[in-house]
Image (tube, rainbow, N blue to C red):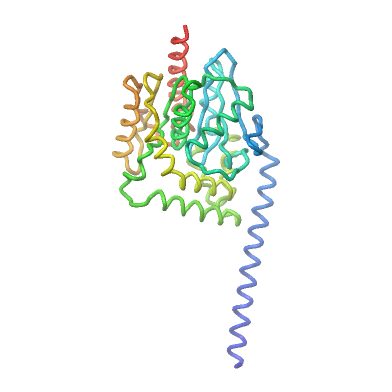
């Protein structure tokens, strides 16, 4: 072997060792910061056991005899995202913001992340926490799928529904970019692997959903978004989207259930389609309340205090409609 070849192999060997050292160092830093975040941000609500894994629920407001408002967050979000809405509702009604398994303070599970499975886990968590029906369920973004599945699986427990710029089951089959859902799933799985090296922490992917929230809640969302498991859960939810779509296609009609739909004006991509889909959701019942919140974006609808007040007012109106029926 010539001297040139030996030097070349030594150079590549040093480069490989250097890269391995850098990756190990990045992983160690990520682990240390994860431990730090767990100390800084303990669960603010209660943890209940659901089939061997813990789920986190944040309960606020008086138990005034019902209904209880249940808040279902978006694709990669969880309970702190509902802070302003819960604050607005706290004077009049009990509300529950919770974390789906694999998000926030809820432990991951091996079950599929389709709408019906998520809805059944929510029912079990509410039962474990002794939070009795009836429920008015509000779902933001992806959260619109499981709340609709909940209403279908448990119609006797569901008193009303609010869809907060909610996902339409058909949106990916009608999206102009082919296989957009698959692209998102693969991206999230990639982020999950990169998360072990601290890449998600550097990217701060929770910036959009946390903007406008108080510092504590924004930091909680950002700390969770830095975890590999969070991205993996998002990927699993995307993977099960087609199953969720089939489940909701066969769902029973909502009838005259008190029902409200909120849409937004600020849509950077696919505005016309997304607006059409919100109008279609409003047609799920003949007397649905439909409102477009001017100046609101998909994320700011719950994270911005002013826009969140509109969401809370809409939920409160559905609660009042439910109470009027009970008289």
Quadrant housing residue 249: top left
Q: Please tell me which residue lies in front, 40 or 137.
A: 137
Towards the viewer: 210 or 195: 195
Q: Would residue 110 be found to the left or right of residue 311 on screen?
A: right
| 88 displayed left or right of 270 | right
Give percent across and percent down for residue 140. 45, 33
Which residue, as the protein is rendered here, is positioned at the far top? 327
**Count of labels shown?**
0
Give x and y (percent) for residue 274. Answer: 33, 38
* Residue furthest to the bottom: 2
For image coordinates 32% across by 35% down, the residue present is: 277
Q: Position of residue 220 (x, y in %)?
A: 60, 38
The N terminus - image quarter: bottom right
Residue 48, horizontal then vertical, whole percent? 66, 31
Residue 62, image quadrant: top right
Examine the image and state in which quarter residue 163 appears: top left
Q: Residue at x 40, y 37 (%)?
A: 167
Residue 322 lies, with reference to residue 105, above or below; the image says: above
The residue sitting at 47% across, 6% down in the picture is 327
């Amino acid at each position: 072997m010539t001297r040139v070849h030996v030097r070349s192999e030594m150079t590549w060997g040093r480069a490989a060792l250097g890269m391995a050292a850098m990756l190990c160092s990045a992983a160690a830093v990520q682990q240390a910061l994860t431990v730090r975040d767990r100390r800084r941000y303990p669960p603010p609500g209660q943890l209940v056991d659901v089939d061997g894994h813990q789920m986190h629920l944040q309960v606020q407001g008086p138990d005034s005899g019902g209904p209880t408002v249940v808040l279902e967050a978006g694709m990669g979000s969880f309970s702190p995202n509902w802070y302003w809405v819960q604050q607005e509702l706290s004077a009049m009604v009990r509300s529950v913001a919770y974390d789906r398994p694999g998000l926030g303070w809820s432990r991951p599970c091996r079950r599929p992340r389709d709408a019906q499975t998520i809805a059944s886990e929510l029912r079990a968590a509410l039962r474990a926490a002794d939070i009795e029906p009836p429920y008015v369920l509000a779902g933001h973004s992806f959260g619109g799928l499981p709340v609709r599945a909940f209403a279908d699986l448990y119609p006797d427990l569901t008193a009303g529904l609010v869809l907060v710029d909610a996902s339409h089951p058909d949106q990916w089959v009608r999206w102009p970019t082919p296989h957009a859902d698959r692209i998102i799933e693969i991206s999230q799985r990639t982020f999950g692997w990169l998360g072990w090296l601290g890449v998600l922490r550097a990217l701060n992917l929770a910036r959009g959903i946390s903007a406008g929230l108080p510092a504590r809640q924004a930091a909680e969302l950002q700390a969770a978004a830095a975890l590999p498991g969070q991205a993996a859960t998002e990927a699993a939810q995307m993977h099960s989207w087609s199953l969720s779509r089939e489940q909701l296609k066969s769902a029973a009609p909502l009838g005259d259930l008190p029902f409200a739909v909120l849409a937004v004006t600020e849509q950077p991509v696919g505005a016309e389609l997304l607006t059409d889909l919100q109008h279609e959701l409003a047609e799920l019942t003949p007397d649905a309340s439909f409102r477009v919140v001017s100046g609101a974006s998909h994320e700011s609808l719950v994270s911005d205090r002013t826009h969140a007040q509109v969401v809370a007012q809409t939920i409160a109106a559905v609660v009042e409609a439910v109470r009027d029926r009970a008289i």
